[in-house]
Amino acid sequence: MSARALLIRGATVLTMDAGLGDLAGADVRVADGRIAAVGQGLRAEPGDEVIDATGMLLLPGLIDTHTHMWQGPLKGLGAAMWGMADYHKHIFSLRERVGAEDMHDATLACGMEMLDNGITTVLDFCHNVMSPEHALRALDAHRANGQRVLFAYGMLGSFATLKEDHVWRLAQVRELAASLAGDETTPLRLGVALGSLEYAGMALFEEEAATGRALKLPMTFHQNVAGQVHELEAAGLLGPDMLPVHCNPTLDAELDVLAAHGCGISFTPESEVGDGRNISVFARSHRAGVTPSLGVDVPSRVALDLFSQMRLTFWLMRNEEAEAERHAGRTPLTRYPGVPFIQPRHLLEYVTVNAARAVGLGDVLGRIAPGCLADLLLLRGGAYGPSLGDPAAHVVLQSTVADVDTVVIGGRVRKRAGQLTDLDRNDAIAASQRMRHRLFA
Ligand SMILES: [Zn+2]
């Protein structure tokens, strides 16, 4: 079923496409779920829905490459946490009590809020598949929301029964791979969230990766412990279909290994800083050619907002560079070739082109170019007017979720003039309350 064709007129278009660049006062036509044309003075065809985007910025829908959506309604529970021990004690331990209906309600609430905030695609790292029903109900919620989703089926369950549970989990991955089979346009795709090497061990990890590869499923895993990249390299397991997450203890030599295998890394700056991790890996990976992307990670402590992630990440990276200059005695700060390295536009690349690649859709998503999937975001220029200079810098340094005017996913208008078109925010609020009631009442 295809939506009505769409002509978006008169926007400042940040195509994020190397060939097309930024276009002022430009139009984008969408038909059959894809970008049909990009340029100035496009003609509306009979039946087109026309959106006047004068004064607005048009960019690819934002892509989050690492979020545990089952934690959506737990917002605030992790607010004052200090390090991973707190996380394990207060949040991760709740997994055992989160039932299949909670998975549905949490996923519905979390996905709808993300969509409302301009996140058109998410990699749901679902590490709470405590029963087959848990996965099925989370998938039901994704279908109801219609967000573009890579559902990374979590292999990590109760630590005590990890090995026994491995059997039914792999069986369900095989079943779901058949039932969710589609092509690049399918909104809900299956992936595998591999067990963390430090908990699962190499034998289980290898079996999971072999299954994922045989089924051609994108894979992702938490990489929290030093030396694991070299271990995986030695086992012959790395590949462009694998997205490591965090990678804070990763050495430069390991980044070269990841780059050689065509891997990206998903960084989750707010949660990583909150855990006291070393974030020098952001810039080191970028320089090494390992494409960074961003994720919210833990909605229990981090807002479902990629604008704040982009801004925080930019300033963290700038701060690191400035600190290096101070340590070298080069103050006041002076420009010289290669310094400063990180630019605002890089952050927009992290959540569009890089992230599209990370979820296995690098050829068709994350850019506004003919043939690409029509996932789009119209941003108001700001209530008090736009910035001078680079519009990408405006998005990264000035925009907020309150500026999200229109959201299009697969050519369908899901939010228009600041209002969701076919979802009811009250359904998300009610779902969130149901889960909280079951867990805490
Ligand atoms: Zn995580």
Image (cartoon, grey):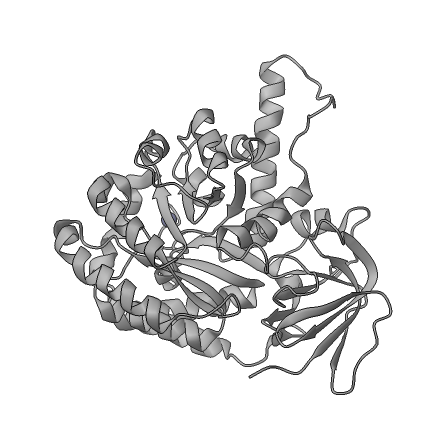
- Examine the image and state in which quarter residue 179 appears: bottom left
Question: Percent x, y for residue 414?
Answer: 58, 75
State which quadrant residue 77 falls in: bottom left
- In depth, the one of 425 and 346 nearer the eye is 346
Taking the image as shown, residue 6 lies to the left or right of residue 70, namely right
Which residue reaches farthest front? Answer: 214
Q: Looking at the image, which residue is at 47% across and 26% down?
A: 252
In this rendered view, identify the residue nearer to me: 300 or 292: 292
* Quadrant of the rendering where the N terminus is positioned: bottom right
Q: Residue 23's x, y, as percent?
A: 80, 57
Left or right, residue 364 beside residue 431: right
Q: Is residue 346 left or right of residue 120?
A: right
Q: Does any portion of residue 81 appear in the rendered image?
A: no
Q: Is residue 316 above or below residue 111?
A: above
Q: Residue furthest bottom?
A: 47
Instruction: Confirm whether residue 207 shows in the render.
Output: yes
Q: Quadrant of the C terminus?
A: bottom left
Measured from the top left, where is residue 401 in percent x and y? Answer: 60, 60
At 51% across and 79% down in the image, what residue appears? 423
